Image: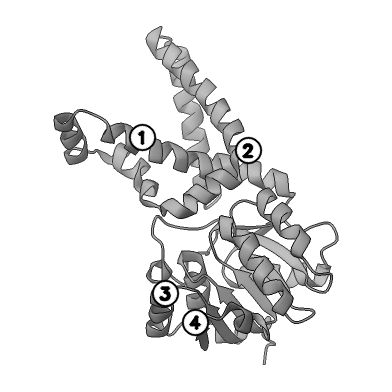
Amino acid sequence: MTQPIFGTLCVIGPGLIGSSVLRRLRTQPELVGRLIVADRDPAVLDRIRHLDLGDVITDDLQEAVKDADCVMLCVPVGAIAPVGAAVLPHMKPGAILTDVGSTRRSVVDTLAPHLRNDIPYVPAHPMAGTEHSGPDAGFATLFDDRWCLLTPSADAPQEAMDRIADFWRAMGARIRVMDTDHHDTICAMVSHLPHLIAFTICGTADTLAEDMRAEVLDFAASGFRDFTRIAASDPTMWRDIFLNNSDALLSVLDRFSQDAAAMAKAIRERDEQTIVDTISRGRRIRRSLLENRQA
């Protein structure tokens, strides 16, 4: 019989990502011996019980982590450091602390003073998701063929890194290890900036004169509809992401603003070559996503 990756896993914050992990583990029970699920919201815990996604379900975070071989923080990025600081003193020596946050530098810097030498910390970011949130939004195949980015510190034990990497491979993900700041810049470009633009364009549509606003919503074609799908995402989660990755996000936003201004200039001046070159570059990027199985 194959040894489980973890005897006991504690998932704190079973939203879209956390509940998808739990669903996957229910389909592959050999990966983890016991599932402990913790959250401070009674309604969330009721849903987890109804969906049968945990063996132990509790609102007591300190009790939840004490016997876990791995504690996975699936809370919004703004809560990762406070929750981590609260549970670290109660984790057993040798257990692994990990998370699924999509920003790294602010989390690592805030959590660093609370880390223990006998608790390896291996941050992980599964680059998967939908615009939906909460325990009912998850599904077992969410991570299939998606990238999971690991950003461990230079002194993180190799054994702990290997176990977290093995875990995410078992979830269906592909693994890449990268530097913390490089991670934040990449994610600002491929995830955070698109969400910012989607939220903003919906805000622009909302400020139109009432009669035109109604028509925009009535006649929204595939471009507006598909592009703004992600604008239905959780406001609290994305507020935290924007604020916790502000430097990298503002840097790529500045670059985008320059490129948008250049495109506006080309349209104003009827510069056909620049317009065609910009559209062609976009097509190449889209095709590369398809070739890389990311679309």
What is the number of the mark on residue 27? 4
What is the number of the mark on residue 55? none
Number of marks in the rendered image: 4
Residue that mark 3 sits on: 44
Residue type marked 2: Ala
The mark lying in front, picked from 1 and 3, is 3
Dot 3, crowdedness within 10 Å: few (<14), some or many (≥20)?
A: some
Marks 1 and 2, how far apart at CA: 21 Å
Residue 285: x, y in percent? 52, 37
Question: Residue 97 sits in which quadrant?
Answer: bottom right
Marks 4 and 2, how far apart at CA: 38 Å
The mark lying in front, picked from 4 and 2, is 2
The outermost residue toward the bottom is 1
Mark 4 vs 2, N-terminal side: 4
Residue 295: x, y in percent? 47, 50
| 100 on left or right of 129 | right
